[in-house]
Image (cartoon, rainbow, N blue to C red):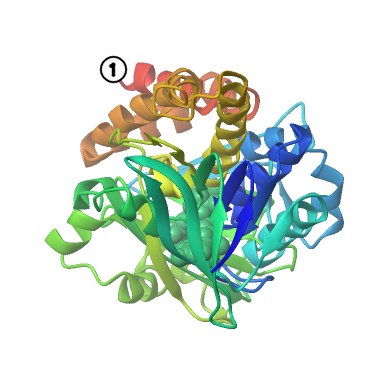
Amino acid sequence: MEQRNYDVVIIGAGPGGSAAALYAAKKGLKAVLVDKAKFPRDKTCGDGISGKSMRVLKELGLTSLIEQKEHSKMRGVIFSGPNGQLLDLVAKDVPYCGYVVRREVFDNTLFQEASKVTEAMQETSFKDLVFDGDQVKGVIVTTKDNEDIQLNCKVVIAADGALTPVGRRLGKERMPEDHVMVGIRGYYKGINNNTDRIEIHFLESLIPGYFWIFPTQNPGEANIGLCIIEKYSKQRKINIRNEVNRVIKEETLFKERFVNAELVSEMRGWNLPLGSLKSKKVYNGALLIGDAANLIDPITGEGIGNALLTAKFAIDAIADAIETGDFSERGLKSYDEMIEKEIWPELKLNTRLTKLGRSKFLMNLFFNKASKDPKMAEMLSQTLIKEKSSSFSEKVLRSVF
Ligand SMILES: Cc1cc2nc3c(=O)[nH]c(=O)nc-3n(C[C@H](O)[C@H](O)[C@H](O)COP(=O)(O)OP(=O)(O)OC[C@H]3O[C@@H](n4cnc5c(N)ncnc54)[C@H](O)[C@@H]3O)c2cc1C
């Protein structure tokens, strides 16, 4: 079998994997980026690129490139509670606070940039890990010509998404049903009253999950979908595909808006592994990032930001380990420490908020209060736009209690 040598092998070229390749190049590491798909490829998603993602894109120098592609700029967020009460939070001092970019476009942009600075192998699948004792020493991949190649390395980064075949090989178990959301999305045109805000509607049937409308760059068009905790979808006997139809045809807030709307894509479903449960992310010679490390925000369903951030943390940890020559779990533990410091407090807080979100009564209380109090709405807008999402959650929690 052919063998090749690298510092880092990255399996999966979604936002996490491509960002890891870009950060690896910045640090002068020899990396290879492997994906089973041929780019451009789609990924089931709401396509919402939040402030957190925007900050990493800026650091990578990719903001203007993204803005040259088809995208819409979002000026705020419209929320509604189970009782239908609306809360419209608009960015005041900044022209916009997020984008909606189709993942086919977004991921391909990152992948093409990564391919300029790193070796990339498309249509190449992860087959197995190579071990020396309990230390990962590389990966065997299978190319589209059915050829197996052994990629030896110091560290493997698993950026291979929610099902994470690399993580499974390392012993990671499937997430329990109350820590995974099931989501579905499609593109509709002819929607009435689209705004320049993303819309998140906490409907009674879905809470703490929600129904979303994320407007694209085309007037009247949006990515729409919903997500619900897997356990609840079973308990409440909700078929997510049928539920989308029910929501747009029957719910008071939407039936007029969707009266002439037409589905212009497939409805596609996928899993959202939530960061509401801590799990192992560091192994001897391997790190899990993004969805592979279950880091999706349990309230917003946002995972791109943490996939990009953990790509950066993983490369920083590997660069540190190269200094010491220790690629064991101990040598790579700074990766865990960065997540613990920068990401976990937010996930922990939003997990608490999800528990509150399970109560229809408390959700309605919050929406009634916030929508009737302009000062509170203003404070929440400012927090949402300018600060970390944990500060937003903290203020929501405080306002309820
Ligand atoms: C319905 C839905 C709506 C969502 N909406 C949003 C949103 O609006 N905003 C947001 O921030 N997040 C959203 N998310 C979450 C977001 O999509 C993920 O968090 C994000 O894609 C994670 O990026 P990643 O790079 O970790 O993994 P992925 O984007 O899943 O990329 C994984 C890559 O690994 C590759 N791969 C898998 N297996 C193999 C293999 N065996 N060999 C080689 N390659 C392999 C895949 O082809 C893929 O390219 C949503 C998710 C869902 C399901």
Which residue is nearer to you in this view: 282 or 312? 282
- Give the x, y percent position of residue 104: 66, 67
Residue reaching furthest to the left: 235
Q: Secondary structure at mark 1?
A: loop
Please identify the quarter of the rendering in which residue 40 is found. Answer: bottom right
Residue 122, position as x, y percentages in the image: 64, 69
Residue 241 vertical position relative to residue 18 in the rendered view, above or below: below
Image coordinates of residue 20 in percent, x first then y, are 63, 43
x 29%, y 51%: residue: 180
Q: Amino acid at mark 1?
A: Phe
Whether 28 is drawn above or below 125: the answer is above
For the C terminus, the quadrant is top left
State whether residue 253 appears in this view: no
Which of 230 and 210 lies nearest the eye of the viewer?
Answer: 230
Question: Within the image, what quadrant is residue 147 found in?
Answer: bottom right
Which residue is tagged 1? 401
Residue ID at (35%, 75%): 241
Q: Is residue 247 above or below residue 139?
A: below
Q: Residue at x 53, y 38 (%)?
A: 306
